[in-house]
Structure formats: structure tokens, C-alpha cells
Amino acid sequence: MMLLKKSILLGLALLLPLTAQAGISEEEKASDAAVVLRELATIPESAIPPKLLEQAYAIAVIPDVLKVGFIFGGRRGEGLIAVRTRDGKWSNPSFMTLTGASVGFQIGASSTDLILVFKSRESIDRITSGKITLGADVSIAAGPVGRAAEAATDIRFEAEAYSYSRSRGLFAGVSAEGASLAIDDTANADFYNDRNVGPHQLFSSTNRNNMPGAGRDFVRTLERFSPAR
């Protein structure tokens, strides 16, 4: 019993860093998301195949997803997601959160940059309608990477979403399956300086006039690696 209590207390202590991102401004998060996308998309050994990017309906970038645990663990991150509008261009981005919990033998902490590539509009409609769980509400798989994947002529993208990550710390890696995604209305209101802005409005617009520079940089990065279709 004493060991269990100590494990729970240590687990809670390790989970405290999950709240550290609260002090980071939305512009900084958007800027970090653009950097992550550029870096992960341009490394030949782990690049997202252009063939998959061409099929993408939406792309989410969540920098510094924190995962900590000691028997009881958790993970949390905040990033941006944008979708293709009817004319094939990338929409204004919306902020979103990723959260998850786990129980089992684990100890340590890690920070992971995560990119999620969604193929269908149905997946995004579920996110805008409420929180979803990857793997349960949306089928997800580890995305193929690099030159070998792009060279394979018979490669098929049958899952609804694909995940790409870059991990640091004590964990060997991180899986997106089991994580929950939700729109962050508070972050959107702060970023766009509009308390009435919502994901439906953002995802249907390509007007960047009221968007901070970091948001425009994120969209330009998307347009560079996944041009309008």
C-alpha cells in the first residue's frame, strides 16, 4: 500500500510538467508548429511521402507533446490543424489539444513532436463536433516514411489518419493511438482576438487578414509541402 501511494504521488509530480505549456503564447505555439512541419517534412530519412500529402484533407502539427509517468502516466500537447477548403487551398488553422493517459510499467519523461495526416473530412467533422479518440473513433496507423515509401508503387493509405513523431527523453517513442483530440476554443479566441470564432468558421476561410504572422507562416509551410490541388 505504501509503495502504491508513493507511486501515485510520484506519478502526479511527473505529470506537473504537462501544465508548463500554459505559459507559452499561441503565437509561439503556431511558430513552433511551422518549424516542426518544416523539419519533419524535409529530412529524407523520415520525410512524409508527397503521395500521402497530396491525399491529405487535414494536417495537424502538435509540438512538444509531453509524456510522463511512473506506473500512472499521461500526455498532453497543443498545436494547430488546418483543412483543405472546397477549392483545394489550406484553411485558416485552428488550435487543438491532445491528451491521454496510461497505466502500466513506465517511468520517465519525454517530449515528442507529432504530425497527424487525416485523409477524410469525416474525421475532422468528428473533431469539430466534440472530442474524439484516435484508434477508437478514427482509425490511425504509423505513417510510412522516407524514400523507400515514396518509391513503392503499390503503397496504399487505407487508414483514416497517419502519425509521424520525433521523440526525445527516456521513452523509446510515443503512439498516437488512444489519445484524445479536441478543438481549443480559448486558444482560438486569444489567437484571432475574436471570442466568437469557431472551427467551422476557420475551416471554411482562407482570408488571412486578421491572422497573426505565425499563423500565416504555418499556412505557407503547409502550402509549400502540400500545394493546393
Image (spheres, grey):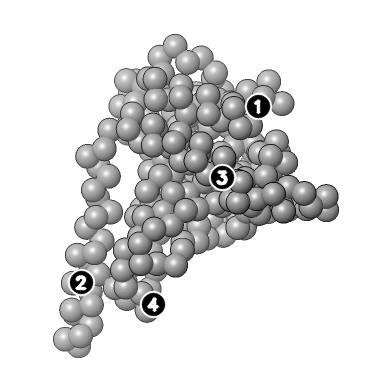
The residues bearing labels 2 and 4 have C-alpha atoms spaced at a distance of 14 Å
**Mark 2, residue position:** 10
Mark 3 or mark 2: whose residue is earlier in sequence:
2
Q: Determine the residue positioned at 46% across, 21% down.
A: 216
**Mark 1, residue position:** 227
Mark 1 or mark 3: whose residue is earlier in sequence:
3
Q: Determine the residue positioned at 53% across, 32% down.
A: 82
Q: Determine the residue positioned at 56% across, 30% down.
A: 222
In this picture, residue 135 sits left or right of residue 151: left
Q: Look at discs 1 and 3 and give the one toward the viewer.
A: 3
The residues bearing labels 4 and 3 have C-alpha atoms spaced at a distance of 34 Å
**Mark 4, residue position:** 104
**Mark 3, residue position:** 43
Q: Look at discs 4 and 3 and give the one toward the viewer.
A: 3
Hey, what amino acid is under mark 4? Gly
Q: Secondary structure at mark 4?
A: strand
Hey, what amino acid is under mark 1? Pro
Mark 1 or mark 4: whose residue is earlier in sequence:
4
